[in-house]
Image (spheres, rainbow, N blue to C red):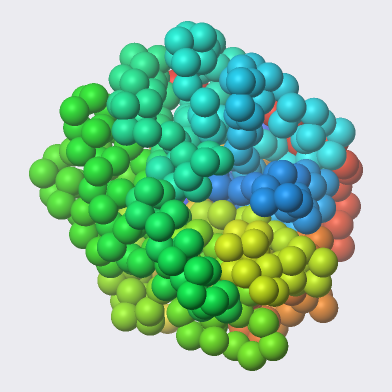
Amino acid sequence: MDYKIINGTIVTATDTYRADIGVQGGKIVQIAKKIKEPAQEVIDAKGLYILPGGIDIHTHLDMPFMGTSSSDDFETGTIAAAFGGTTCIVDFAIQGKRQSLKGALKTWMKKAANKAVIDYGFHIAITDLNNRVMAEIPEMVAAGVTSFKCFLAYKGALMIDDGALYRILQESKRAGALVMIHAENGDVLDILINDYISKGLTEPKYHALSRPPEAEAEATGRGIAIAQMAGAPIYIVHLSCKEALAKVKEARDAGFPAYAETCPQYLLKSYNNYLEPNFEGAKYVMSPPLRDKSNWEPLWKGLAYGDLQIVSTDHCPFNFKGQKDKGKDNFAAIPNGAPGIEHRLMLMFHEGVNKKRITLNRFVDLVSSTPAKLFGLFPQKGTIAVGSDADLVLWDPKAQFEISAKNHHQNVDYTPYEGFKVKGLPKVVLANGKVIVKDNQFLGTAGSGRFIKRKPVRL
């Protein structure tokens, strides 16, 4: 066999146990208390956890937006992901006006080809619906794209109306796809944004004030209600506040298949960051915006109790100098988005597991297993089992690290988590049965990541 990993503690979403793992041809071929067969290389995982590779189902690499493009492409972004223990991403192919879904997918496939160092898939964001596009939905599912995104915000650009959302939900249900929504009330936000600007209130904090939690809660509840009318499941991306969480919890308590993710920034950063001097608040301009600290505890409890199912990043980086500063005189011109693809696992392990907000198994569930299950990747990915892809992270729970733009691999000039001290880091990362990160050295190859055709979703 290619690799034998010995003396480690395997951790999945449900189990924790000591065993050796045998890897051959990119797959896990054996799990046993003691593997006697020889291997080309033996990796000693004594004192380490062996985790399934992280799966980040919300990234925006090389994405044109607001007159610029996100600063990480599929090479730099996936290298940064790998250093953080993420071995698979699902990015967003954004449909342009009058473009086919097939055309959008082709555009993003070209962006990733010969660049990605880990496996990847795509959601397609539908922004311009017509009958021809509707007919493409089952075609995209057959091609391995089993999720679609709808924006209820960004009026005049990405936003669709409620009727379009209803039709997409209906057809996606028939085809076996999951519909995701960006839940903010775009009509009201458009008015609020223009009101602040007309009054000369243009600092970064007004980005947050123009996107209140009530607008997110309303759109979350409306999206769920439309999904109920369509008889289709729904997934809420980047949920940021307790008001929106209450809408999800109400639907789930009634037995409806509503699912939601949150992101580390909404658990660890707050509105106060917008008040940082010298325009530094622009670093945190994202949508939805950071909320008051009073949202942290409800969101952590939502993760612990199952009201929230996934932690992703919404990684959409723009440099502070040369991109974010284009909005120096107008918060509405600041590109929306922030980096995070590299630090998701270490932040969630330290702030979640070490601080006893979530269990170790729940951590694996949130960052790997449930993303795989909801988005058609399980059991190929998201678990440690014979026959699964050998996407593995050897995790040192005692290693300590200080996050900084000086030591990260993201192609951006800042990190929202500057100065955060964490305990627990990836020591060795395998993707498709090959070691691509070891002792903070990159050993992978651009283009080695594969496009993964995901399975239809029936929830």
Position of 271 with respect to 249 (left or right) is: right
Residue 6's spot in the image, x, y percent? 67, 55
Write the residue at 81% across / 53% down.
76
* Picture quarter with the C terminus: top left
Which of the two residues, 455 or 429, is positioned nearer the viewer here? 455
Write the residue at 84% across / 39% down.
115
* Picture quarter with the N terminus: top right
Write the residue at 28% across / 71% down.
298
- Viewer can see residue 24: no
The answer to which image quadrant residue 165 occupies is top left
Q: How many marks?
A: 0
Position of 90 with respect to 263 (left or right) is: right
Give the answer, above or below, for where 338 lies relative to 294. Answer: above
Write the residue at 52% across / 41% down.
156
Which of the two residues, 436 or 296, is positioned nearer the viewer here? 296
- Viewer can see residue 186: yes
Residue 89's spot in the image, x, y percent? 63, 43
Residue 54's spot in the image, x, y percent? 58, 51
Position of 1 with respect to 195 (left or right) is: right
Give the answer, above or below, for where 21 lies relative to 122. Answer: below
